[in-house]
């Protein structure tokens, strides 16, 4: 059986690619560029968003037909589906994060932030949502829309992520990697780099952290913070 997938191009066009030749399914409509585009977990839908026309559009991935349009007073910037695909979380150019029911398009909750939102994600069960601004991480109950817990930091926060033990949240604070223990409501430093951090990825059952910086990629032991190996450009040790 030939496998097919959807490519999102600029201007936004859905194209079906198979083993023989590309086939245009349907040109789709945002006024200008799309700011984000994702598949639903079951790949039934493709969700696109645009800052330019203040809409997000839900498309049937097989037929290319528009299923639903979501509207905002401010442009949508990023999108995420809950693990079961029943809820969509969207951030905007303003301080709001919105939760929507996927099939009905019903607005479930608006999570009010005090600053521009840099990231928003679900936990693995979909019952919690995590949002982050420059100096704060918040955990929300997705059923009620109520704030559960928050953490502030004087340095700029980036790359927050739930671990498999969802009482633990990893985040970058300035040039340091830190772990927030939600049960104890404490935060400790795991490592510190001398350069800006672009990416972090846990590997080997979350015992090690691969950290990408401006010039170096380093592998850290999660428990001790010891550097296990370093790569600079094409030279690794």
Image (tube, rainbow, N blue to C red):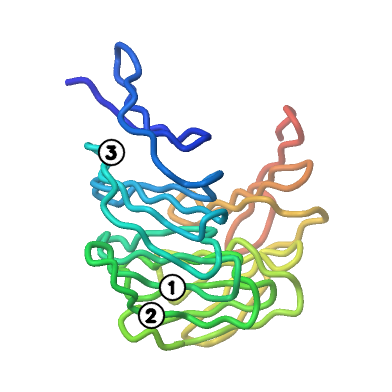
Is residue 22 or residue 55 the one in the foreground? 55
Q: Position of residue 51 (x, y in %)?
A: 56, 56
Cα distance in 3D space between marks 1 and 3: 25 Å
Q: Earlier in the sequence, mark 1 or mark 3?
A: 3
The local secondary structure at tag 3 comes to: loop
Residue wearing tag 2: 109
Locate residue 180 relative to residue 134 in the image: left or right: left
Q: Position of residue 199 (x, y in %)?
A: 63, 51
The local secondary structure at tag 1 comes to: strand
Residue wearing tag 1: 98
Disc 1 + disc 2, Cβ < 8 Å: yes
Q: Position of residue 73 (x, y in %)?
A: 52, 70
Question: Label 1 neighbourhood size at 10 Å, few (<14), some (14-19), many (20+)?
Answer: some
Q: Earlier in the sequence, mark 1 or mark 2?
A: 1
Point out the residue furthest to the right here.
Answer: 194
In terms of image quadrants, where is residue 83?
Answer: bottom left
Looking at the picture, does residue 212 appear above or below residue 108? above
Task: Write the residue at 47% across / 37% down.
Answer: 12
Is residue 228 or residue 106 the one in the foreground? 106
In terms of image quadrants, where is residue 114?
Answer: bottom right
Q: Earlier in the sequence, mark 2 or mark 3?
A: 3
Cα distance in 3D space between marks 2 and 3: 28 Å
Task: Write the residue at 34% across / 75% down.
Answer: 107
Question: Label 2 neighbourhood size at 10 Å, few (<14), some (14-19), many (20+)?
Answer: some
Residue wearing tag 3: 64
Eye-nearest disc, 2 or 3: 3
């Amino acid at each position: 059986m030939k496998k097919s997938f959807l490519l999102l191009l600029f201007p936004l066009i859905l194209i079906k690619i198979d083993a023989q030749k590309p086939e245009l399914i349907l040109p789709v409509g945002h006024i200008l560029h799309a700011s984000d585009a994702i598949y639903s977990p079951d790949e039934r839908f493709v969700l696109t968003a645009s800052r330019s026309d203040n809409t997000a559009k839900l498309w049937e991935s097989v037929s290319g037909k528009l299923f639903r349009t979501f509207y905002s007073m401010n442009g949508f910037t990023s999108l995420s589906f809950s693990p079961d695909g029943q809820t969509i979380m969207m951030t905007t150019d303003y301080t709001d994060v919105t939760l929507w029911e996927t099939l009905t398009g019903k607005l479930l909750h608006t999570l009010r932030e005090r600053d521009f939102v840099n990231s928003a994600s679900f936990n693995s069960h979909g019952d919690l949502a995590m949002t982050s601004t420059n100096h704060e991480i918040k955990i929300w109950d997705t059923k009620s829309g109520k704030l559960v817990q928050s953490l502030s930091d004087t340095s700029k926060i980036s790359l927050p992520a739930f671990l498999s033990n969802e009482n633990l949240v990893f985040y970058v604070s300035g040039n340091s990697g830190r772990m927030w223990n939600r049960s104890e409501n404490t935060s400790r430093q795991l490592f510190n780099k001398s350069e800006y951090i672009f990416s972090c990825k846990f590997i080997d059952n979350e015992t090690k952290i691969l950290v990408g910086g401006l010039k170096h990629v380093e592998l850290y032991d999660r428990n001790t913070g010891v550097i296990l190996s370093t790569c600079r450009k094409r030279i690794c040790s």
